[in-house]
Amino acid sequence: MVIATDRMRMQQPDEKQHAASAASGDDEALPQAWRRLLAAPRPTATDEPGVLGFFLEVMPEENAPFARLDVAPVLLGVVEHGRYARPVPLDSRHLAQSPLQPHEQRLAATMLGLPQNVRKGRSYARMGGHVGDTLLAEILDTAPCFLGGLAGLRLSRGKSHQLNWHWKMEPDGSQRLLPVLPHSQRLLRIDCLWYLDVERATVGRFDAVGEETHWLDLPPLKHEHGRRLRSRLSGSRLATRVPPPQVFGEVRRSELAPKPILILHALTRHARLAAGTPPLGYARLAFDYAGERLPGRGGEPLVRRVRNGQLVEINRRRAEELTAMEQLERAGLTPGVDTEGLPWDVAETLPDDAWLFPGTGYAGALEVNTPARWLALRPKLEAENFHVEYAPSFPFEVLEGPVQWYGHAVEDADDHAFDLEIGIELDGQRHNLLPAVAQALAEHQLNLSPAPNEPEDAVWYAPVDARRRVPVRLKELRGLLAPLAEYLEKPRKKLHLPRVQAGRLEELAAAMPGGSQLEAAEPLLGFAARLRDAAERASDAVPEGLTVEMRPYQREGLRWLNALAEAGVGGVLADDMGLGKTLQLITHLLSLKQGGALSQPALIVVPTSLIPNWQSEIARFAPMLQVLTLHGPQRAEEFDQLGAQDIVLTSYALLPRDVVALRQQPFALIVLDEAQQVKNPRTQARRALLSLRTPRYVCLTGTPLENHLGELWSQVDLAVPGLLGDESAFRRFYRVPIEKQHDEECQQRLNLRISPFILRRTKSQVAKELPPKTEITRRVVLEGRQRELYEGLRLSLAEELREVIAERGISHSGIVVLDALLKLRQVCCDPRLVKLEAARGVHESAKFELLMDMLPALLDEGRKVLLFSQFTGMLKLIAAELDRRRIRYVTLTGDTRDRAEPVQRFQNGDVPLFLLSLKAGGVGLNLTAADTVIHYDPWWNPAAEAQASDRAHRIGQDKPVFVFRLITSGTVEERIEELKERKAELAAAVLEGGGSRQKLSFDEGDLDALLAPG
């Protein structure tokens, strides 16, 4: 059943076909081809009308006076108004299917039967021979012809013209026989000679015999044969067709020296030149023989030229030409064919006589042959007698002539700055050169220091626009740039300088070349003069309320600080240690307050260890000044009182923590004591300082320069932002030239920059104003674990002493009392001296750190220092640190056997530092080489302390002596000082009898004062 069903299904199409046949009346189905024959023809779309046309192209023949003609047949559509459109190229394979008339197909087939050259999608045939003449005439007569394409001229056939001939003189005196043509016509060579007249849009034939076509193949007529041909022509059959050639007299021989000419070119398009990269610069060499330019490569040794109707023969000097080529090689150039790093496909693109800079690697020459580098080579080549020219492809053109400089500064009052231009005037238009200078410096195409053996008249080619360059003398340019060097480190569109830099305009005005001037408003141009006037005009009057008398140099420092305030700028007070920087600053603040200029508080930032020192000195010198000290965990409670103060005192350690609160309060000025603490511009404290609101900073430091000039930059940049440029520019234009190259001119320029803003007096400079002995107390605060150790010992020892005194009485408790006080004093000096379990692991020592800050600064100033301590263990700790820092010293203690040797070394200047113990060095020594004495720990006996100081301050001393006492605030050391001042009987000694430990010379009240909490 299934098979039968399938068979029925298979038979269904035949049944339908049979039914269709029956319907048509046919007994059997016919093949499709016959059915198509019987069917009615289908209607066909009428083909668009089309005609045969021809596109003609003129193909110049190299080194020939004629051109060839190529023709391509096309099918042209005809649109309204009989215009032609939509050209379709024809080829021999599809020609039969084209809708062309039989005569058009024949003409197209004839054209396509010639040898073809396919380009632009068309098949072109070269017209030549008798067939070419016939075909060209026919297509011009019967079909539309266009020059190049439909957008070109539509050509028609022109009338035949008579062909005439003339002699064309070549540069070497030879002559060529050529047809005479109007300027609008071009000569076409098919078999006969034709012309193309572009003005009339015609192509026509010259009337001439066939042989005249071949006259175009004749070689040039040389001078030697001219006279003979002239005589032969006169009687020949060609006399009416060929004019007589020109005949020269005797050849004049010329001996000339060649002038090398280097023509700069640039390859702008090549697959290897990526978009946005500079073109590939190269040069071609030629030689000029008195106006006659000859190629650098090839050519005949004898060259003839026609000059003023006379034939001149030039004998080329090959040896001199070779010397010029060797000069190019010494300048770093190589012939293109020998250039390393030049890819072969680029080398093939360049002319054979190209010269280039070699590169490294496969394509390194593409990177080094920039037009700018070629331009920079010009001065060197011109110094070697080369003449440099620029081809149209080269992107630069050099303008010759005198240079007129100008300078222009415009103040930006809103930004406390000014904009500066320095440039040249050209054709009445100004061109600011500073952006181009900065770019050239960044790319090392320009250097602010002369190169070795640089000629006096060396130039730099300054760009005035994308193509033109003007040579400017490097000596003049460097003179103008010297005042601005550090600001040209990075390319920028304009120079925007801080107002404090207006002093540089005086230098710039002085450096302007003759006939040029610097234009600037008086507030800018007179800035430096006003600073000097302010310094002279400022008052040095000591304000009321100052409790001490100022020395003359200190009053001069007060005048300088007042002048800075009047000018609204900051500065660096860098006097030697001990000359009273703190006093001068406090007096300046007092002057500001009395003058009504301290409407906002002054913020003074100091090392933590110096806070007590500042507190005591402000209270001592100017008690009328209101001071708020931000110190301790409860300081946040006092933030709301900031605005009511004259002075806010804080530390570098706390400043970053409190910066948010401090930002809310504007300050009249910010003072930085020991400003070298923030010499690193990347510290948190420095960043916090720069975020505060203040018009100016004043830095106090005894060591503006410890290791290198970068530290000077750091402090000056903080006090006078922008004065010395950024850090990297300062390093390049000042540090390196001064420190490594010992550039005195650069040093003078730096001194000139900073002189209005930095005041430094050394001890030797003001020695005549100093008393024989200056005593200075430096206080320091115990912090952290050292403070915890001290307080713990103080409490436990106080309890222990009360029990002993209650049992024995104070007069019989001397040993116990003094031992307790000794432990507390040792904690103040350094916890490592204390032989207790509680002191182990406590490494902080505020006084030790203060000493190690002071000593390098004092020694850098050239001081000769005596350092006293009654603890020999302390001297050993100090000696160990000095060894680690490689600071030279000698020591004298009770263990020293040869006392004369260290004394002699110190006195002779072999070492600058002498460590002495109380017992060994306090008496019997004459150390007049010393000018500084440091008492590391206070002595019970002030007379003995004075006697130790007198080791330096005694007969034979010819220098003022500074005596420093290091005291820890809020400790037994400070209580000892107060006790000595309060009790007259302790002026000679705390111990009765000068050393007995059995009977104390103070009572329980004194002991309570010594053990009082800080």
Image (cartoon, rainbow, N blue to C red):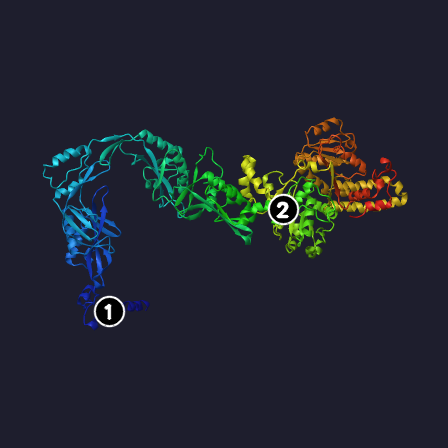
Q: Give the x, y percent position of residue 548.
A: 74, 44
What's the amino acid at mark 2? Arg
152 with respect to 981 (left or right)? left
Q: In this orientation, which residue lies closer to the viewer: 1012 or 130? A: 1012
Per the image, the residue denoted by label 1 is 17
> Which residue occupies the extreme right position in the image?
808
Residue in the picture at 57% in, 45% down: 529
608 or 578, nearer to the observer? 578
Q: Nearer the viewer, residue 238 or 668?
A: 668
Q: Furthest residue to the bottom?
A: 23
Judge the density around disc 1: few (<14), some (14-19), many (≥20) Cα neighbours within 10 Å: few
Provide residue 693's location: percent of width, then percent of height.
62, 53
The tag on residue 560 is none
Mark in the foreground, 1 or 2: 2
The image quarter in which residue 472 lies: top left
Q: Residue 36: which quarter of the image?
A: bottom left
Q: Position of residue 977 (x, y in %)?
A: 79, 42
Compared with 24, 287 (above or below) is: above
Q: Is residue 335 left or right of residue 156?
A: right
Q: CA distance from mark 1 to mark 2?
A: 127 Å
Could you classify mark 2 by the number of other residues whose Cα lies within 10 Å: few (under 14), some (14-19), or many (20 or more)?
A: some
**Is 591 situated left or right of 248 in this image?**
right
Three-letter amino acid code of the residue under disc 1: Gln
Residue 364 visible, this angle? no
Residue for point 53% across, 47% down: 525
Q: Counting residues from the N terminus, which is met first, the one under dot 1 or under dot 2?
A: 1
Secondary structure category for the residue under label 1: helix
Report the quarter where the N terminus lies: bottom left
Say if residue 860 shows up in the picture.
Answer: yes
Q: Is residue 891 above or below residue 146?
A: above
Look at mark 2 in the image and give the residue it sits on.
Answer: 537
